[in-house]
Image: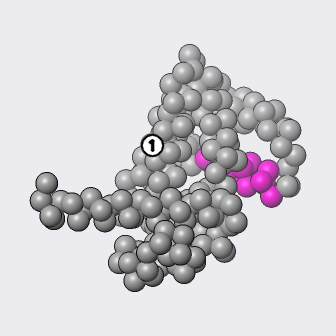
Amino acid sequence: MSVQERKERERAARERLIVATARELAEQQGWDAVTTRRLAERIEYSQPVLYSHFRGKREIIGAVALEGAAEMAAAVRAAASSANSPRERVAALARAYLDFAERNPAVYDAMFQLDGGLAFAQEGTPAPLKDAFAALLESLGEVAGDGVEPGLFTEVFWASLHGLATLTRAGRLPPEDTEPRVELLVDRLAMV
């Protein structure tokens, strides 16, 4: 292995450590606790080293969001792939999405609530964000209905899931009614 390859590998490892540490700190104490000083202390590197990877907290949030998008896409696909019918796929997708949001609140915030400097629904949208939407579209497109554009249907269904996740987490909706909400959403919106 060349010196250059070793340095690139070490740099990538440091970047993964920064993102993992930011994510862990945010999940434990919230995003306000994630500062470059605190991250530098936790990873035992100087702040200039941290800044050589990310220009600041905004870029770190963006990196966590991209990682989360890839994880959410995998979770949604895995759930949908185990279902036997369109209705089961849509219900499994909805449950997987809501479960991801519940289990990873700081990551979910990085993806959808905080400014990570990422472009959504544009040509320059990063691949992990496009893939997360594609993971939803794969199952939802087949139930959009006649004359309904699948992408638009997926956006509306996704917005419904996001609303359920956000309102439940904020204590505006009781969590014990999540399953009846999923059933209603699948039966009425997806009509499968």
Is residue 134 or residue 33 the one in the foreground? 33
Towards the viewer: 93 or 20:
20
Residue 105: x and y in percent read 67, 55
The magenta segment is 156-170
- Tell me which residue sits at (49%, 68%) in the image: 43
The residue at 81%/32% (across/down) is: 180
Q: Nearer the viewer, residue 73 or 60?
A: 60
Could you tell me residue 83's position as x and y percent? 57, 20
Instruction: Give SS at disc 1.
Output: helix
| 108 relative to 36 in the view: left or right | right
Hey, which quadrant is residue 9 in on the image? bottom left
The total number of labels drawn is 1
Please determine whether, in this image, residue 81 is positioned above or below residue 65: above
Task: Identify the coloring.
Answer: one colour
Name of the residue lying farthest toward the top: 84
**Residue under numbered circle 1:** 134
Majority secondary structure of magenta residues: helix
Q: Residue at x 63, y 64 (%)?
A: 26
